[in-house]
Amino acid sequence: MEPVAEGDREAVAAQIGRAPRGLRAIAHRCPCGLPDTVVTAPRLEDGTPFPTLYYATCPRLTSRIGSLEAEGLMREQQDRLATDPEFAAAYRAAHETYLAERDAIEPLGTDVSAGGMPERVKCLHVHVAHTLAAGPGVNPAGDEALALLPAWWAPGPCVAVDPEG
């Protein structure tokens, strides 16, 4: 994790089309240097719970993840939860890790994490963001999806921002 540097807030705002809410840190950067995954606060500024700790921001990345969802990867992974005990156990462990990381910042008093964990595969964006933040071997759904993604950063920065803010 990296602190939010000068220009990061503006870059994330340009990526997501609005001011970021609950921005705590940069979890991962594209090779172009811009954030592609951020850490959000467990509660937004107004106190609203926000269980999505890791949030993918790069529009190229999120578009390509959306393509994997449309192609049925989420459905395949959901089916595997019922048929592949190893995948299901690793997915449950990812859920526990996610909860521990979020609760270390601020406990929400709930065992709801994000992306449908641990019983459903509901949002590949959450899982890829978790993998980018935590590294490989933590979230099997994110690991698989990330391995299928093309180099979203290859064309260069996804947004134009002033690095000085």
Image (tube, rainbow, N blue to C red):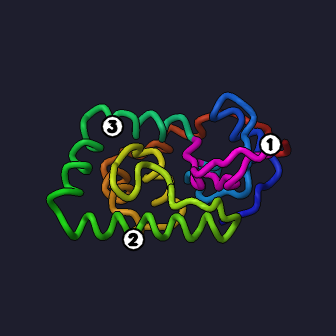
Kind of element beneath mark 3: helix
- Residue 118 coordinates in the image, percent (x, y): 38, 59
Figure check: 132 above or below 34: below
- Residue 111 coordinates in the image, percent (x, y): 51, 61
Q: Which residues are magenta?
A: 36-57
Sooner in the amino-acid sequence: mark 2 or mark 3: 3
Q: Amino acid at mark 2?
A: Ala
Marks 1/3: CA–CA distance: 31 Å
Residue depicted at x 76% and y 55%: 4
> Between residues 13 and 82, which one lies in front from this camera angle?
82
Q: Amino acid at mark 3?
A: Glu
Marks 2/3: CA–CA distance: 22 Å
- Residue pointed to by mark 3: 69
Marks 1/2: CA–CA distance: 31 Å
Q: Amino acid at mark 1?
A: Asp
Kind of element beneath mark 1: loop
Q: Nearer the viewer, mark 2 or mark 3?
A: 2
- Residue pointed to by mark 1: 46
Asked if the stretch drawn in magenta spans residue 39, the answer is: yes
Sooner in the amino-acid sequence: mark 1 or mark 2: 1
Q: Main secondary structure of the magenta part?
A: loop
- Residue 21 coordinates in the image, percent (x, y): 73, 42
Tell me the quarter of the picture where residue 138 sits. Answer: bottom left
Figure check: 48 above or below 3: above
- Residue 50 coordinates in the image, percent (x, y): 64, 48
- Residue pointed to by mark 2: 93
Q: Is residue 69 left or right of residue 63?
A: left
